[in-house]
Amino acid sequence: MRDVPLWREPVPPDGTTMGEPEARGRFGEYGGRYAPESLVEACREVEEAFRQAWADPGFRGALARLLALHAGRPTPLTPAERLSQALGVRLYLKREDLTHTGSHKINNVLGQALLAARMGRRRLIAETGAGQHGVATATAAALLGLEATVFMGERDIERQALNVFRMRMLGAEVVPVTTGSRTLKDATSQAMRHWVGATGDSHYCIGSVVGPDPYPWMVREFQRVIGEEARGQCAAELRTGVPDHVVACVGGGSNAAGTFAGFADTPARLVGVEAQGGAGAARGRLGVLHGCRSLFLQDDEGQITQAHSIAAGLDYPGVGPEHAHLRDLGRARYVTVTDEEAVGAAVRLARTEGIVPALESAHALAWVIRAAGDGELPAGSTVLMTLSGRGDKDVSTLKELL
Ligand SMILES: *Cc1c(COP(=O)(O)O)cnc(C)c1O
C-alpha cells in the first residue's frame, strides 16, 4: 500500500520543538503519567534525578566517557556511494550498527544505568522483545556493577535463543512472561508490575521513548547524541550543511527521536518509517498503554491489538507520545513499509555497501529506495538515514526467506 504524501511545510524553527515536554510530561495532547500511585511517585523521583543529572557537567562527562570508551562513539557518517549512484540521491548512513552490542539501544541504557547508580539503586529492571534492549541492559549493568532482571515473553525467548544466552552470560536474570500473547507488550506490563514492589532498590530501564513521564523525554535526551553527532558530521560533509531529508525507523521511536532532535530546528524534512503491521503513528488511535497517552493500534472496542512485523524491534502496537505530537504538528511525517520491502532493502544494502543491516533499520532504507524511485525524493537530494543496528540478530529469520 502506498502512503499519501502529506507534506506541510516544516514548523518554523522556533527552538521549542523537541525541547522539554510541557507541564505533567505532555507533548501536545500526548504523554503524561498514567500509572498506579506508587509508580507515579517513583517516576517523580526518576524525573528529579534525571533533571539534576542532566544539568550536571560531571554526569554528562561521565556518560560521554562511557559512550566513547565502552560504546565506541562517535559513530561514523558513511556515504553510501554505490547505492546513492543507483538511486540518484545522496544517501548518508549514521552508523549506530557499529556501537558495542550492535544498536543504538546502548546510548540510552548507559545513561539510565549511570542515573540508577547515582540514585543509589542496585538493580535494573527491563523488558525486551527481540532481546536487543535486554542485552544492552545486561551489558550496562555488568559494566557498572548492578544487577539486571529482564522480562521477556515466552515466545520471544524461544525465538531469540542467542540473545537470551547473551543476557545470562552477562549475569542477568531472564524472567519468562507467560501471560497474554507472551511477547513484548506483556513483558512490559509485567516489568511495570514488578517495579511496583521494588521501587526502593530498583530502577526501571525502559528501552524506548514510551511509558510514563519522564521516560519519553529522558530516553530521547539519551538518544540525542545520534542527532547531534550527525548534525556536526553533516555540517562538515554537505555543502548545504543540513540534509534535505532525515529518515529513521520507528518502533517505539527512540532512534528516530534522537536523530530528529538534532535537526528539529532546521528545514530538514523528518520521516519516521514504521512497519506496516506496527504502524502506531501512521494508523494508531488515541489510547493509554504502559503509563502513557499516545497512538495505539486498537480494535473497534478500543482493545490494543497485537502488532506484526518481521523486525521484532518494530513489533510494538504503539508509538512514543512525542512522535504522535510531531505528526499532529506536521513537523515529521510517518510512512509504512512491508516486510517484503524491508527484506529487499536489507539485501540491497548488503550487496551494494557491504553492510548487513538490522531488519528494523532496513525499513528506513526501504522507504528511501521507494521514495527515490517514485520521485518523492527528487534527484540529487541529500538524505541522512540512521542505521539503527546491525543484522547479525536477524540471520536466522533471513535464512528462512532467502
Ligand atoms: C529496538 C530497535 C529498534 C526500534 O526501537 P526504537 O525505539 O523505535 O528506536 C530499531 N532498530 C533496532 C536495531 C533496534 O534494536
Image (tube, rainbow, N blue to C red):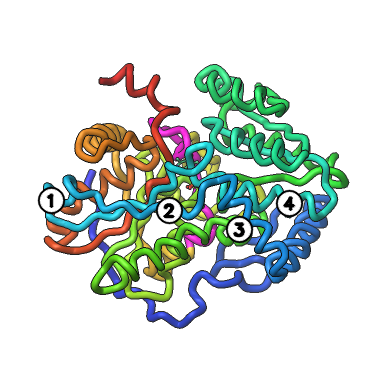
353 is within the stretch colored magenta: no
Relative to 14, does residue 225 appear above or below in the rendering?
A: above
In space, the residues marked 1 and 3 are separated at their CA atoms by: 36 Å
Check disc 4 and give the amino acid type. Ala
| Camera-nearest label, 2 or 3 | 3
Question: Callout 1: few (<14), some (14-19), or many (20+) C-alpha neighbours within 10 Å?
Answer: few
Q: Tell me, for residue 35, which label it has, or none.
A: 4
| Highlighted range, magenta | 307-324
x then y, percent, for residue 341 = 25, 37
Residue type highlighted by circle 3 = Ala
Comparing marks 1 and 3, which lies closer to the viewer? 3
| Residue appearing at x 62%, y 33% in the figure | 186
Disc marking residue 64: 3
Residue occupying the far right of the picture: 200
* Magenta highlight on residue 323: yes
Residue 248 visible in rendering: no
Position of residue 189 in the picture relative to residue 319 (left or right): right
Quarter of the figure that contains the N terminus: top left
Distance from label 2 to label 3 (Cα)?
32 Å
Q: Which residue is mark 2?
A: 281
Callout 2: 10 Å neighbours few (<14), some, many (20+)? many
Q: Which residue is mark 1?
A: 85
